[in-house]
Image: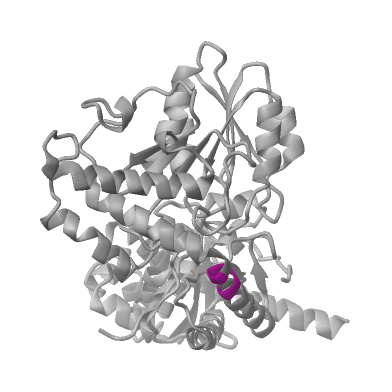
Amino acid sequence: MKKVIYLDNAATTKVRPEVVEAMLPYYTEHYGNPSSVYAFSTPCKKAMAHTREIIANALGAKTEEIYFTNGGTESDNWALKAAAEAYASKGKHIITTKIEHHAILHTGEYLEKNGYDVTYLPVDEMGVVDLKALKEAIRPDTILISVMFANNEIGTIQPIKEIGEIAKEHGILFHTDAVQAFGHEPINVEELHIDMLSASAHKLHGPKGVGFLYIRKGLKLRSFIHGGAQERKRRAGTENVPGIVGLGKCVEIAVASMDETKKKETELRDYLIGRVMSEIPFTRLNGHPTQRLSNNANFAFQFIEGESLLIMLDMAGICGSSGSACTSGSLDPSHVLLAIGLPHEIAHGSLRLTLSDETTKEEIDYTVDNLKAIVERLRSMSPLYEDFVKSREKKEIQG
Amino acid sequence: MYSEKVMDHFQNPRNVGEIEGASGVGTVGNAKCGDIMRIYLDIDDETRIIKDCKFKTFGCGATVATSSMATELVIGKTIEEAMKVTNKAVMEALDGLPAVKVHCSLLAEEAIHAALWDYAEKNGITIEGLEKPKSDISEHEEDEEY
């Protein structure tokens, strides 16, 4: 296989060898069911407790507030549906944003069909949620605010502390989808007034199919998956022990190296953004210039279409992603890019590149060099660019 | 997800460009939906043979490949023969397209028809079976720069 430059770490990440190594014994040696009474299952119970401790420490939470799930989507579904059900007697209004992941948006739509009212807050052109709109949206029957910690497409980090304070003042539950931010950004659930938080291992160099939901003690959330008494009777099903071990290991590494990783990624990201913006004309940076995830860069290249761009990058061995309609499987481009006010035709030409701590400057240089040539080539084929050039020439003659 | 032929026509598109003083030009599609195709035709008025065809396309891999294949299929054909180049013919020539991309091949047929319509209008002739293009885009006005 030819060398791959993987710049799609917001989609998923490479599992660290240390994580795999930690997981392996739980497949072949310590394979007991953690619910069993015999001593053979003790290492499984211990390993799960250890992961719970790592996560609780990372969040400033208590171990009994961490519930293992199969990942971010399940955690989001659980948080929204269970909170809606548990607090329905208080009210049926939920506030979220227009730029949430589909795990939140589609769950919101589901709740709307089931008698709930959902407000989808707008964001500004940088992708930051409008706090004034949030305050105005609050009603006596508002039971839940769910705002993502950082956006998966454009990387913008939300003013979580302010949102948490607003929620607390009004006695409303606050959930955050931290799938992109957990392990990347420091998060303390007490300081930020977070009541529920979703996260996933595979965005953090851990295995796929495992994540958790933090639920503040005292919240009356019922079980979402019914069955056995696992996870304090709140999430049935035999635990994914190797996955949970992997989750613990990747979080441990992420937390210990967070500052260093952030510094390294930020430098490389800014280098990437700097080169692209100065060397490729008619390009826009999507998302906030500074208040963004350290590994995220998102561009819109005018006059070209994202899928073509991705295929050409792929031919050069570069993995990226796009918010174009063709890659989203619908006729509309990404809802996030539309929410920050991009016109459809420009949203179609977007490219997201997300780095990891293993990304090198050489890889970035190779990517930008290829990107420049590809954008130029696609523009030379684009009728939109042709029209633009002709109208510019016309203006120059007239001017 | 794409056939080898589609990938070949995407990577090495045939007949990309413009024709100065073309006999007919047709632009179809919509930037909002993410694809626009423009076809230029050079037609011999005497023989009604398409001597040359070029294209410019804004769109996904399938749209680029269908544009390229469509130009190859109509060059050397008479207007009447070119009218028979349907989206199905373009798709077959490309060894098929994924189901979600079938609409891209419709654009190629429409673009050829739009260019022929332009030629017919300019020359005051009628082409049998040709209808006014329905998805011709209006003049593009966008000078926003980033």
> Considering only vertical position in the picture, is B55 above or below A116?
below
Q: Which residue range is magenta in the image?
A: A260-264
Q: Quick one: A55 or A352, which is closer to the camera?
A: A55
Q: Which residue lies furthest to the right in this view?
A: A399
Residue at the image position 55 percent from the left and 76 percent from the top? A382
Q: In which quarter of the view is residue B113 placed?
A: bottom left
- From the viewer's perspective, is residue A180 above or below residue B141? above
Q: Residue at x 46, y 52 (%)?
A: A331
* Quadrant (top left, top right, bottom left, bottom right) of the N terminus of chain B: bottom left
Principal SS element in the magenta part? helix
Q: Where is residue A357 in the image (x, y as percent from the top left)?
A: 48, 73
- Left or right of A275? Residue A214 is left
Q: Check the image and name the residue furthest to the top.
A: A89
- Tell whether position A261 is magenta: yes
Residue closest to the eye, B136 or A130:
A130
Q: Compare residues A38 and A335 and report the one nearer the observer.
A: A38
Colour logic: one colour
Image position, residue B94 (x, y; %) = 26, 74
Looking at the image, residue A86 sits to the left or right of residue A18; the answer is: right
For the C terminus of chain B, the image quarter is bottom right
Q: Residue at x 33, y 41 (%)?
A: A69
Give x and y (percent) for residue B60: 43, 68
**Residue A233 percent across, percent down from the top left:** 30, 25
Is B127 inside the magenta-drawn segment? no
Of the pair A287 and A231, the residue shown nearer to us: A231
